[in-house]
Amino acid sequence: NPLLQVDAIQKTYVTGGNAFHALDGVSFTIDHGEFVGIMGPSGAGKSTLLNVLATIDTPTNGDILVDGENIAKLEEEALSDFRRDHLGFIFQDYNLLDSLTVRENILLPLAVTKTPVDETRSRVDALAKRFGITAILDQYPYQISGGQKQRTAVCRALISNPKLIFADEPTGALDSKSATDLLQTLAGLNEAETTIMMVTHDAYAASFCRRVLYIQDGRLSKELIRGTTSRDA
Ligand code: ADP
Ligand code: ADP
């Protein structure tokens, strides 16, 4: 069965008596292990879609099944448990906290869990080793380079062993070398079975995705599967 099943999602904003459908009946499924890009013009609804799928926002109508469980119907507390246990996030500006060390930033998603300290310590150490940031674990974000911040953000996204990673314009603020590093890292994670959904404006970033969904005016307008021709949705 698919990892993610999105069924007739609507997100409606009402302003001054007018209803505006930021998402207007979006449906698709994502299988385990896919690396999916989401593209489309500014204002099309990409961030809204990603936020709804990432449980940061709730849809007005429609269902979202993750491994068969309908998360569109969960209460806030169950949602935050779900988010913490199953999802990882990578954002354009990293969202690292300057008042915390690199180690503490990586541990942030586990802050409210009862994961034993020994276990969290060994998880951070293993991730830091894998991404080459062991030497800076006790430093603060303002003391490290852009590339190190990026790798810190990747480690934080991975600390809970998420089955699904959401990336919102992850290369938007990066020079081309750092962007390539990040995209290769995501591709490597994907090869190791992590499912990834990435919103991007950048054709180069999208070229790392095997499948790209195009959103226009709150609807799925087109889908491209690499190695085949594109087709209208
Ligand atoms: P994209 O990420 O593709 O640029 P967004 O998902 O950010 O697009 O926005 C889609 C549309 O929904 C835009 O027209 C935006 O103005 C509108 N929108 C987003 N958030 C709100 C909100 N809180 N209230 C009203 N309209 C919103
Ligand atoms: P965009 O402007 O492209 O929509 P943002 O960086 O503003 O992207 O993030 C979108 C939303 O995600 C915001 O509401 C933000 O508070 C929330 N957010 C950011 N980082 C995290 C995180 N690590 N975990 C959960 N929610 C987050």
Image (cartoon, rainbow, N blue to C red):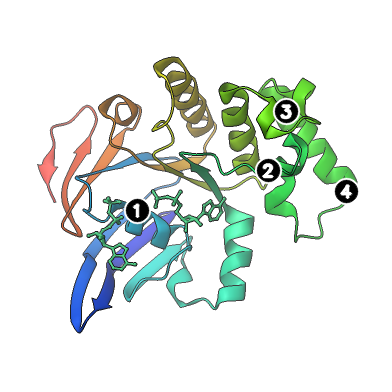
Task: Please give the residue where the numbered disc 1 appears in the rendered image.
Answer: 47
Three-letter amino acid code of the residue under disc 2: Ile
Q: Secondary structure at mark 4?
A: helix
Three-letter amino acid code of the residue under disc 4: Val
Q: Nearer the viewer, mark 1 or mark 4?
A: 1
Q: Secondary structure at mark 1?
A: helix
Quick one: label 1 or label 3, which is nearer the N terminus?
1
Crowding at dot 4, Cα within 10 Å, few <14 / some 14-19 / many 20+, comes out as: few
Three-letter amino acid code of the residue under disc 3: Ala
Q: Are marks 2 and 4 in contact (CB under 8 Å)?
A: no
Q: Secondary structure at mark 2?
A: loop
Q: Are marks 1 and 2 in contact (CB under 8 Å)?
A: no
Q: In the rendering, which numbered label is found on residue 128? A: 3
The quadrant of the rendering that contains the N terminus is bottom left
Q: Residue at x 43, y 72 (%)?
A: 72
Vertical relation: 212 (above or below) 185: below
Q: Is residue 35 left or right of residue 129?
A: left
Can residue 36 be seen from the camera position used here? yes
Task: Please give the residue where the numbered disc 4 appears in the rendered image.
Answer: 117
